[in-house]
Image: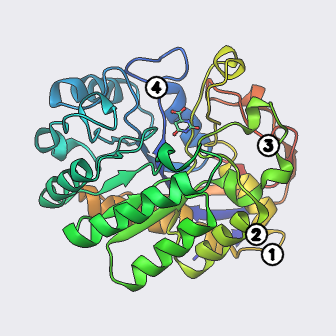
């Protein structure tokens, strides 16, 4: 599938199903121009943005602000996600899903869980009618704080039952817990229309690596134990986890000091995963390319009827050190600063 010559390798361009570009509303953290430039530098050919914006994309009128900015500034295809609820509050009224459907890849309240089962069921029924997925940030804090895995997998367990009842395509964001991997594995066996993504930091780090109080390790959901990391890798290998998405979430240095959760990831995803997992024999390059390119391309095609293609040339032989000051993204928070990696995008 890949062509290799000298120091370089041609790989299919990646698709990231989960990024936060901060416009409209938070241009001081990231713009569509800077975020999409970072994506190009990371070897991506298309990205999907999450809806925690101001205004939230909860109606065509509000979504139009984001669509206009994308048209003006995007350096590659940027496909928005509409919010599930009005104001992306995780509660209250459902958004104007029907009028947004032609312009979005699906619906999500990323950052907040939808904890009212009846509301989530109604959202799934409407999304199914529109041929769109519900893209879920699973977090129900009634089961414990975010550090307690139950806050993720209990919310997931309920949603899988709703997805089975409604037939809605249900896509799970940033899976981080071993129990979640097992629930998704079983649901797939049972024929539920579920797909899942995890993020690079959950695959190459575990809680023993986290420097407490250091914002470069602070994201939501948090990095969990070694057994969770192992389960995520197993899930990726056996196809339970379909995609690796970065959850690229830029914040200013001051916002990070104030405790905002989120890391940047677009410019480090492939080099970190290739160096730590492929070169060290944990995953094959095919596993990685499936999870970063083929599988997310296929999902995006299913959800938008648009086909994204193209290849990217990489130098995978010349090591370099990750330096956040060289990033195109406005965010600098990463646990990978100073890592020596292989995988320089020659775009
Ligand atoms: O760490 C996170 N940052 N998790 C989220 O769910 C939201 C994101 C953000 O928007 O910064």
Q: CA distance from mark 3 to mark 1?
A: 20 Å
Which corner quadrant holds the N terminus?
bottom right
Numbered label tally: 4
Q: Residue at x 71, y 54 (%)?
A: 224
Q: Is residue 315 left or right of residue 236?
A: right
- Eyeballing the image, is 159 above or below 81? below
Q: Residue 48, located in which quarter of the rendered image?
A: top left
Asked if disc 3 and disc 1 are in contact, CB closer than 8 Å, the reply is no
Q: Is residue 324 left or right of residue 124?
A: right
Asked if disc 1 and disc 2 are in contact, CB closer than 8 Å, the reply is yes
Asked if disc 3 and disc 4 are in contact, CB closer than 8 Å, the reply is no
Residue on which the image places disc 4? 22
Asked if disc 2 and disc 4 are in contact, CB closer than 8 Å, the reply is no
- Comparing 280 with 56, the one in front is 56
Q: Is residue 259 left or right of residue 198?
A: right
Name the mark on residue 281. 1
Q: CA distance from mark 2 to mark 3?
A: 17 Å
Q: Is residue 83 left or right of residue 346?
A: left
Q: CA distance from mark 2 to mark 4?
A: 32 Å
Name the mark on residue 336. 3
Disc 4 packing (10 Å; few <14; some 14–19; many ≥20)? many
SS category of the residue bearing label 2 = helix
Task: Give the mark, 3 or 1, whose residue is nearer the N terminus.
Answer: 1
- Comparing 66 with 167, the one in front is 167
Task: Give the mark, 1 or 4, whose residue is nearer the N terminus.
Answer: 4
- Eyeballing the image, is 102 above or below 255? below
Query: Can residue 88 be seen in the rendering of this structure?
Result: yes
SS category of the residue bearing label 1 = loop
Name the mark on residue 278. 2
Task: Give the mark, 2 or 3, whose residue is nearer the N terminus.
Answer: 2
Q: Residue 132, located in which quarter of the rendered image?
A: bottom left
Whole-percent x, y for residue 148 in the image: 63, 51
């Amino acid at each position: 599938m890949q062509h290799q010559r000298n120091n370089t390798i041609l790989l299919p361009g990646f698709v990231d199903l989960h990024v936060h570009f901060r416009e409209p509303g938070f241009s001081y953290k990231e713009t569509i121009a800077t975020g999409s430039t970072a994506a190009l530098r990371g070897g991506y050919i298309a990205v999907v943005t999450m809806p925690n914006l101001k205004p939230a994309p909860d109606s065509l009128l509000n979504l139009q602000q984001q669509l206009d900015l994308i048209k003006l500034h995007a350096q590659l295809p940027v496909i928005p996600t509409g919010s599930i609820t009005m104001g992306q509050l995780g509660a209250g009224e459902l958004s104007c899903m029907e009028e947004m459907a032609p312009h979005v890849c699906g619906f999500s309240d990323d950052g907040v869980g939808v904890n009212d089962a009846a509301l989530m069921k109604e959202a799934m029924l409407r999304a199914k009618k529109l041929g769109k997925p519900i893209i879920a940030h699973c977090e129900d804090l009634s089961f414990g704080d975010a550090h307690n895995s139950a806050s993720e997998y209990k919310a997931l367990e309920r949603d899988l039952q709703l997805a089975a009842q409604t037939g809605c395509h249900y896509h799970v964001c940033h899976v981080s817990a071993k129990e979640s991997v097992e629930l998704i594995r079983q649901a797939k066996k049972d024929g539920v229309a579920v797909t899942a993504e995890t993020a690079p930091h959950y695959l190459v780090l575990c809680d023993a690596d986290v420097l407490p109080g250091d914002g470069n390790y602070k994201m939501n959901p948090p990095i969990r134990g070694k057994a969770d990391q192992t389960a995520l890798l197993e899930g990726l290998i056996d196809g339970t986890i379909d995609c690796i998405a970065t959850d690229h979430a830029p914040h200013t240095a001051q916002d990070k000091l104030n405790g905002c959760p989120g890391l940047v990831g677009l410019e480090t995803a492939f080099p970190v995963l290739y160096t730590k997992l492929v070169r060290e024999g944990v995953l094959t390059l095919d596993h990685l390319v499936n999870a970063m390119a083929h599988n997310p391309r296929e999902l995006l095609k299913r959800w938008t009827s648009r086909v994204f293609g193209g290849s990217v040339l990489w130098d995978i032989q010349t090591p370099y050190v990750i330096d956040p000051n060289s990033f195109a993204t406005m965010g600098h928070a990463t646990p990978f600063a100073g890592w020596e990696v292989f995988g320089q995008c020659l775009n």
